[in-house]
Amino acid sequence: MFRSIDRTLNKIYKFSGYVAAFFLIFVAIFILTGISSRIFGFYIRGLAEYSGYCMAAASFFALAYTFVEGGHIRITLFLEKATGTKKYLLEIWCLFVASIFSGYLAFYFIKMLVISYRFQERSEGADEILIWIPQMTVALGSILFFICVFHQFILKVFKK
């Protein structure tokens, strides 16, 4: 059962990496469209804001995928010097603290999303989009990151 959950979660992390790449493509499209529209003398409202929203979405969806693939900067300065049980306990402690902080981050992004939805808050840009729409991608990405870090913590605890 744990192996099937592990495989499913790893597929979700990989999918979130693809979603992040999708949003990066949108960033490029919005920026290129904004540049070309200035060259041809017309203005499209909100392109800068949309590219910013897509960049935030790409960053947060990429967190879980990058963490599983080992792309994040980790505290290896101390872990390289430790061996055996000491290294194992340090890794457990680091993943536990990271789980707490990523859970805290996800909780408050969800809270921010709910507040923005309740008040029907709008962006201050030229387009005045409902701000909970781009905040939803950031909240989902932070939830995935929390699940990923906690998943790695559980795997490390039960590995020994």
Image (cartoon, grey):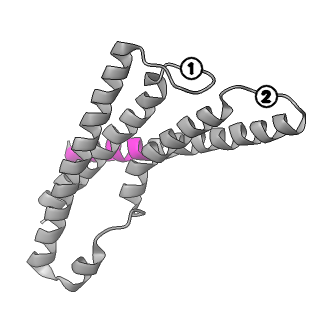
Can I make out residue 88 in this image? yes
Residue 57 horizontal side relative to residue 68, left or right: right
Amino acid beneath label 2 = Tyr
Amino acid beneath label 1 = Glu
- Magenta stretch, overall SS: helix
Q: Is residue 58 magenta?
A: no
The residue labelled by disc 2 is 43
Residue 159 horizontal side relative to residue 39, left or right: left
Q: Nearer the viewer, residue 101 or 85?
A: 101
Q: Quadrant of the C terminus?
A: bottom left
Q: Position of residue 95 (x, y in %)?
A: 20, 59
Residue range (magenta): 2-14
Labelled disc at residue 128: 1
Q: Is residue 6 magenta?
A: yes
Within 10 Å of disc 1 (Cα), the crowding (few <14, some 14-19, many 20+) is few
For the point 22% across and 43% down, the residue is 103
For the point 22% across and 50% down, the residue is 101
Q: Is residue 81 above or below residue 14?
A: below
Quick one: which residue is furthest to the front in this view? Answer: 124
Q: Position of residue 18 (x, y in %)?
A: 53, 44
Helix, strand or loop at mark 2: loop
Kindly indicate the quadrant of the structure image that contains residue 132: top left
